[in-house]
Image (tube, helix red, strand yellow):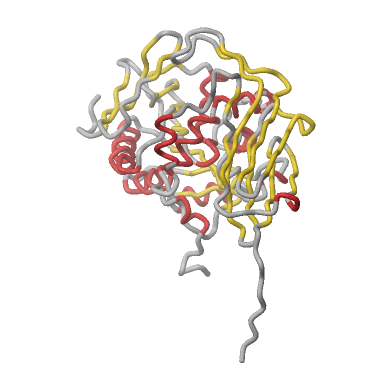
Amino acid sequence: MEMEEVVRIVEEEGIEHKNPIVIAGLPDVGLVGTIAASYIVDKMGYKEIGYVESDLFPPVMVIHEGKLKYPFGIYGNGSVIVLLSEVVVPPNAIYPLTRALTAWIKEIGAKLVIPITGLPVENRVDISKPEVFAVGNSEAAVKELREKQMELLEEGFIAGTYAIMLRECGKRDLNAISLLAQCFPVYPDPGAAASAIESLELFLKLGIDVGELLEKGEEIKLKARDLMRQINLSAPEMQKGVEQDMPIMYR
Amino acid sequence: MEIERRMLKATWGYDGNLEPLYEVEDKEDEILVTFDLPRVRKENVEINTTEDSVEVIAKMSDAVCWERWGGIQKRITFQAFRKQIRLPEKIEPEKAAASFKNGILRITLPKIRRKVFIPIE
């Protein structure tokens, strides 16, 4: 299925969507979304049902078990879709990517979009269980968050792919809620990913036990070093620093 | 500089050492360097500093073995993290301090700085 010239979303034929919830795990601070999405795909046994490609992405393909794959995969079943990228989305690809993704998400009749990401905190090393905050893109989304007693991010800036995903979803009347787990600013954070998955249970009863994610945290950190390094290099261009700024309209 | 280095050099070596993720922060009177050292215990961390550099060698409690990967296509084992960083300003090595918690090594390096009080006339 071709959505846009610049970004192409290619889906396997015959997938029957049943108003799915879409989880987005794209590389960002702490790699929280990527680690969480990857664990969800693994634990739920979701199959790859498509991929996203773009001339704006780096000229990279991934080889897994001898098979050539696109680094930006779409996984899931009829009721849950997981977007998972193994490479950094370049800043100039963010707008066309989020536009194409939200158009496709609307077309498949999704009822909720949940981008998972991190909220960098300086004293993360002293936090044993990271807290999770949420941002909703509509009154309905914020109402749902309040009903579920989620901690809302009340003031501040958000930057990166997930910020634009929330905006683009709003334009298409798609409810979106971003989950932000407290995380290390420049290191991969499986603990934050575990907290995010636990909060996800409020919206989607997957029954995932995060024990293995916490147990294998150190192994995951080792494997995530190179992707984390790429994220750290692209952070200034992503305007990630603005997330630490005070908005002038702060009340 | 950092981008150029990344393009030319991998973050692991055939000598069994991995380059750790690290961050260097300028904190006015001191330089704070942190390292992410998974699989490392405090007693296996060695830190050496000079006036303008800091070196960390950290042995992992279990070696990491990766197979059938990248250009190697055979078994390769890593036993330690190793990294030497050139500091942006000169520091006082004798006054350096370090702590290690949950796999994060923090090294505080006080800058060599002679403060002169200037009275306002």
Q: Nearer the viewer, residue A238 or A169?
A: A238
Q: In the picture provided, is B114 more to the left or to the right than B75?
A: right
Q: Residue at x 51, y 38 (%)?
A: A116
Q: Residue at x 60, y 29 (%)?
A: A221
Q: Nearer the viewer, residue A222 or A131?
A: A222
Q: Classify the position of the N terminus of chain A by image quarter.
A: top left
* Snapshot quadrant of residue A14: top left
Position above or below: B6 against A76: below
Q: In the picture provided, is B85 more to the left or to the right than A28?
A: right
Where is residue B64? Give x, y as percent: 63, 18
Residue A201 visible to an observer of this rendering:
no
Position above or below: A140 against B100: below
* Snapshot quadrant of residue B28: bottom right
Position above or below: B34 against A188: below
Q: In the picture provided, is A154 more to the left or to the right than A2?
A: right
Q: Nearer the viewer, residue A76 or A25?
A: A25
Q: Residue at x 48, y 48 (%)?
A: A141
- Determine the residue located farthest toward the right in the rendered image: B43
Q: Residue at x 44, y 27 (%)?
A: A86
- Determine the residue located farthest toward the left in the rendered image: A5
Residue A40 visible to an observer of this rendering:
yes
Where is residue A99? Give x, y as percent: 30, 40
Where is residue A84? Give x, y as percent: 44, 28
Where is residue B9? Give x, y as percent: 45, 29
Q: How many marks?
A: 0
